Amino acid sequence: MKYFDELKRTMEWLAEQPDTLFIGQTAAVPGTFMYQTLRDVPKDRALEFPVNESFQMQFSLGLALEGYVPVSVYPRQNFLLLALGDMSNMVDKLSAMSGGEASAKIIIRVATGPFKPVHPGHQHVGNFVQAFRRMFDWIEVVEVNEPQEIFPAYERAYLRGDGRSTLIIEEGNFYNEK
């Protein structure tokens, strides 16, 4: 099994679930390396978003509160940083703020940007997994470095019954290497 093939298979499985929607940059149209894993997701299940990371996270939260399980796609961790206020102050704290009455199950899909075959610049290749783990109380942070880790991570994020959100971090260099 290859890393890319397992991501593509997993995204297609998620698209078969009745309550999932894929949102984000290159969720519905080509533009980054992540799109190729979503190219066969039905177009009515994918919403393309402009480059507005904070709004995307707020929209994801709204979808989750309405009973959807959004798969919110951020091609680079560096740009997910622009949504951190919404993640740490709303998504991560919703259950605590509501006394356990509300939760938002969001699958946040992000990658460490690939630097091969050409380095795209330092603002595209950051890996902040350790900072994310220290920052969140409610959002679970999962790295998928091996092909066999991909489906179980996304399946757990989707099937979990505790209402928690999951931040799944992919390694962009592995799309073509493993």
Image (tube, rainbow, N blue to C red):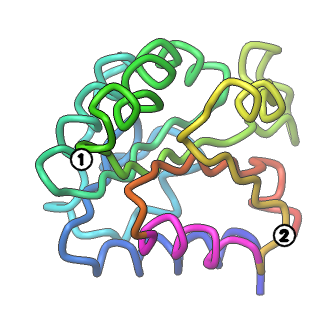
- Marker disc for residue 147: none
Residue at 24% x, 44% y is 101
Which range is magenta?
Answer: 149-160
Q: Is residue 79 left or right of residue 42?
A: right
Q: Is residue 10 left or right of residue 114?
A: left
Q: Which residue is mark 1?
A: 64
Amino acid on which the number 1 mark rests in the picture: Ala
Amino acid on which the number 2 mark rests in the picture: Glu
Q: Which residue is mark 2?
A: 146
Which sits in the foreground, 161 or 8? 161
Local packing at callout 2 (Cα closer than 10 Å; few below 14, some 14-19, many 20+) is some
Q: Quadrant of the C terminus?
A: bottom right
Residue depth check, mark 1 versus mark 2: number of the one nearer the observer: 1
Residue 69 at x, y percent in the picture: 29, 57
Residue at 87% x, 41% y is 117
Q: Which residue, as the protein is rendered here, is positioned at the far front?
A: 99
Residue 52 at x, y percent in the picture: 35, 16
